[in-house]
Amino acid sequence: MKYRLSHLDALEAESIYIMREVAAEFERPVLLFSGGKDSICLLRLAEKAFRPAKFPFPLLHIDTGHNFPELLEFRDRRATELGERLIVRTVEDAIARGIARPTPGETSRNRLQTPTLLAAIEEFKFDCAIGGARRDEEKSRAKERIFSFRDTFGQWDPKNQRPEVWNLYNTRIHPGEHMRVFPLSNWTELDVWQYIDRENLEIPSIYFSHRRKVVRRDGQWLPVSDLITLKPNEEVCELDVRVRTIGDISCTGCIESRASSVKEIIAEIAAARVTERGSRADDKRSETSMEDRKREGYF
Amino acid sequence: MFTHALNEHSELLRFSTSGSVDDGKSTLIGRLLYDTKLIFEDTLEALKRSADLTGEGTINLANLTDGLRAEREQGITIDVAYRYFATPRRKFIVADTPGHIQYTRNMVTGASTANLAIILVDARLGVVEQTRRHAYIASMLRIPHLVVCVNKMDLVGFSEATFNAIREEFMDFAARLEIRDIAFIPISALLGDNVVERSANMPWYSGPPLLRHLEEVYIGTDWDLTSPRFPVQYVVRPRDDRWHDFRGLAGQIMGGVFKVGDPVKVLPSGKVSRIAGIHTYDGPRDEAFAPMSVQILLADDLDVSRGDMLAHPDNLPYVASDLEARVCWMHEEPLRPNRKYAIRHTTRFTRCIVREIRSRFDFTTLQAQRPAPELGLNDVGRISLRTMSPICFDPYERNRYTGSFILIDEATNATVAAGMILEPPKSMPATDEAEYII
């Protein structure tokens, strides 16, 4: 193995290269940090790419306002520990300003993140946003380039993507356009967890098994919070659960689990029979809901 | 059975699949995922729901990879899709490239980083023009390993004679290409014969099933570890008292091994220094090799910036402004001589002018056509170009990363070509950078 890299080292080397391309080629990049496991990996990759210098970009969180409280505490603390600038823009504020409009009856705010993000990109004149999306998450993501071009409306056009050959990314854009860049494109959910384990990265407590009040809805355990209105025949249970992916609390499903360490999570994921996104209600609305949201500018 | 694919030291193998329409690429990938138990229950349920809706009745494995709305509506694959799976021995990244429309462009997109290419051949049809085209492109891209999967063996009665005839025909034609390693495997992607499990229907085949081949093919020499190449990507300069003199040349090693203490030459300026340190977040290293991403610290305070290249003084790349290259044209608007484009080579952007289209490659006859007035979408041809400032390169056949480039239309920013630099004629001196200083 002397001059060979393990798969994790090979993925890491590629991701660091991608981060540095962003830093070298864009004037005003930003890194999207939600406090979730994928963006936690992005932060470590940024440390590896740029330390001992500071990051050449701020962090941005598009806050739905529908959060697991554990996540916000973690987000703020992590940014402080790293000594990096964190910008927060909220869906709440975007609704108040009329930029985002909730659909009647829709509790999830994931869709409303899109106009909020686009407004933030415009406000700060960001020309590139680094995100933690992975191609194994969802079938339309599997088709997306690592450097994903967005027009002046923030739209993704899957039929008109730039060919991406070797490691020669075409970073050229016109004013008003921007690029979304996904350094974890080639990582899988398992790679992310193996990396968190190897790098000994701290993650929010909700990823580990904890006792929580949940309710069964559409085949999922949804966390009971102020944002969920119980239907007449629904019964609140208290279970040992954890989350695999974190979104808006009103639509993030929990799984029953006793995993209390990263190693146990890895063993659980390796044996899992359901995809990670299987626990996101907003992805189940139609066969192409992710693609449709991405066309509108979702990251 | 593969649920504990957790080996931290497993290697990464990137492969691409190509073939004509209906050769069963998507079915093959679906089969690999299905038989390695890597299709999740909710994905299967979604496939079942969609099978009920369309009245197909049975699950269509191809729908696993055709993820876009338009692809499902039309039943075709539009763009490259990337899939991931793992066995305890290796992790795999699969680029599923459509054979349908815009084939050359898509295949180049999917295959440029691949260690291995799978070409599917329909056993009933044998070697067709698309097969030749795909093999030629795999050869042109210097994909180190090729696997020809003769698919749909169930539809030819699992006939050994049919398989042998196709293999012979392919070998005759491939003799004119430069492919180091070819394997032939008779399969039925639909039924699963020789994909993950050995087929009982073809006892005459003594080789491994496809998955085992993918796990075992030797990829240790796929990176060139003899010629040290370090394109400088970014300069890390902390504005911080503790790191006042720190100046890390950040980049990914694109060839060879760099050791602390080694002399290095900075190209194109030609200045010489020594490696004072190799910095990583995880601490200093004594040596680093391709394809690691590191920061190199030089002993002397030289002017080095993005686009420059570090190499060993005894093993230098070419430095030149006049290049001969093979290109795959990727845009509807054709290439015509005397046009100017932006060129991206390693970490350097500069401009260039295409001086001449030397020839256009005809995939039917496998001959170069001269003269060629233009190159259209999906054409492959040979061109000569002159860059505005000199670039440091190796011939593509020696290093896929220091020998490749893309051309960009400066008005639209579209990526219009993927290029592979050819060995310069003998009359050109290997590096004598003094002649090329701007």
Image: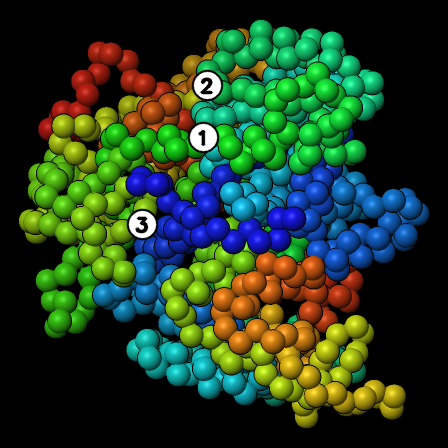
Q: The disc labelled 1 sits on which kind of residue?
A: Tyr
Residue B423: x and y in percent read 32, 18
Among numbered discs 2 and 1, the one appearing first in the sequence: 2
How many other residues sit within 10 Å of disc 3, few (<14), some (14-19) or many (≥20)?
Answer: many
Q: Can you see residue B130?
A: no
Residue B230 position in % (x across, y down): 25, 41
Residue at position x 20%, y 62% in the image: B237
Foreground pick, A145 / A139: A139
Instruction: Point out the frontmost of discs 3 and 2.
Output: 2
> Taking B42 as reference, is A17 left or right?
left
Which residue is located at x 61 percent, y 27 percent? B208
Mark 3 or 2 closer to N-term?
A: 2
Q: Determine the chain carrying the residue at label 3.
A: B
> Would you say the residues marked 1 and 3 are in contact, meaning their CB atoms lie under 8 Å apart?
no
The residue where tag 1 is placed is B218
Above-or-below relation of A171 to B153? below
Say which amino acid is labelled 2.
Arg
Front disc: 2 or 1 = 1
Q: Determine if residue B429 is in view.
A: yes
Q: Which residue is mark 2?
A: B180
- Identify whether A265 is placed above or below B404: below
What quarter of the picture does the C terminus of chain B occupy?
Answer: top left
- Say if labels 3 and 2 share a chain: yes
Can you give x and y, in whole percent of width and height, for residue A36 in the image? 51, 72
Q: Chain of mark 1?
A: B
Would you name the residue on which mark 3 appears? B293
Q: Are marks 1 and 3 on the same chain?
A: yes
Dot 3 amino acid type = Ser
Label 2, label 1: how far apart the Cα atoms are = 12 Å
Q: Is the residue marked by circle 2 packed among few (<14), some (14-19), or many (20+) residues within 10 Å?
A: few
